[in-house]
Amino acid sequence: MKICPKAMLYLSVQRTFLKENKQIYHISRIIQESGKKFPDQAEIIYLNTSKDSENELGKLIEDFYTKDPKKMHSKVLAKRVADLKENKNIEKGEHDAMATYYDRLKKQWEKEGMVKGKEESESKMAKLMGLLVKEGRIEDIEKGL
């Protein structure tokens, strides 16, 4: 039997529906008739965030609900949250660089639009002049010039 690659699904739930008062549930598929694990290596992990505990997992869950990065247990998570909240990238001037880049693109798009618009206008004008000539309305062309 060919074994499938391992697949894991992580779900964080605020209220557990499994009613076993656990903080984490590891669920894998079982063959009912034999009681053996099904060899697809699929696993579901439910994280019950309403269950308090003082272990590492409990501290991580607490960090998820903590708004102030300075009060978080995980230094890695605290740093990332602080970076996002403080918009350090904008403070470094990247906002100005992006605004300048956008302005350049906008000017380029406007220029391209004007060129395209000019080409379309010239094409339409040529068609109109052709129709006027065809109808013998040369004086109307002269009025327009």
Image (cartoon, grey):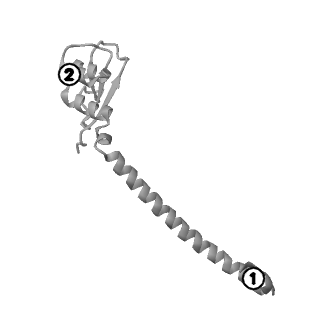
Q: Quadrant of the C terminus?
A: bottom right
Which residue: 47% across, 61% down?
107
Q: How many marks?
A: 2
Residue 144 image offset from top left, x and y in percent: 74, 78
Q: Is residue 24 visible?
A: no
Seen from the viewer's position, the closer of residues 71 and 97 is 97
Relative to 73, 108 lies left or right? right
State the residue at coordinates (76%, 86%).
Answer: 133
Q: What residue is pinned by disc 2?
A: 73
Residue placed most toward the observer, 95 or 56? 95
- Residue 141 - label: 1
**Is 125 left, or right, of 11 in this rendering?**
right
The one of 71 and 102 positioned closer to us in this rendering:
102
Left or right of 14 on screen, residue 116: right
Mark 1 surroundings: few (<14), some (14-19) or many (≥20) residues within 10 A: some
Dot 2 or dot 1, earlier in sequence: 2
Q: Identify the amino acid type marked 2.
A: His
Is residue 118 positioned above or below 45 on the image?
A: below
Q: Is residue 52 above or below residue 73?
A: above
Q: Is residue 136 something one can see in this rendering?
A: yes
Q: Secondary structure at mark 2?
A: loop
* Res. 66 image quadrant: top left
Query: Which kind of residue does numbered mark 1 sit on?
Result: Ile
Q: Is residue 32 above or below residue 134?
A: above
> Of tags 2 and 1, which is closer to the observer?
1
Q: Secondary structure at mark 1?
A: helix
Where on the picture, by quarter, is residue 82?
top left
Sort mark 2 into few (<14), some (14-19) or many (20+) by Cα contacts within 10 Å: some
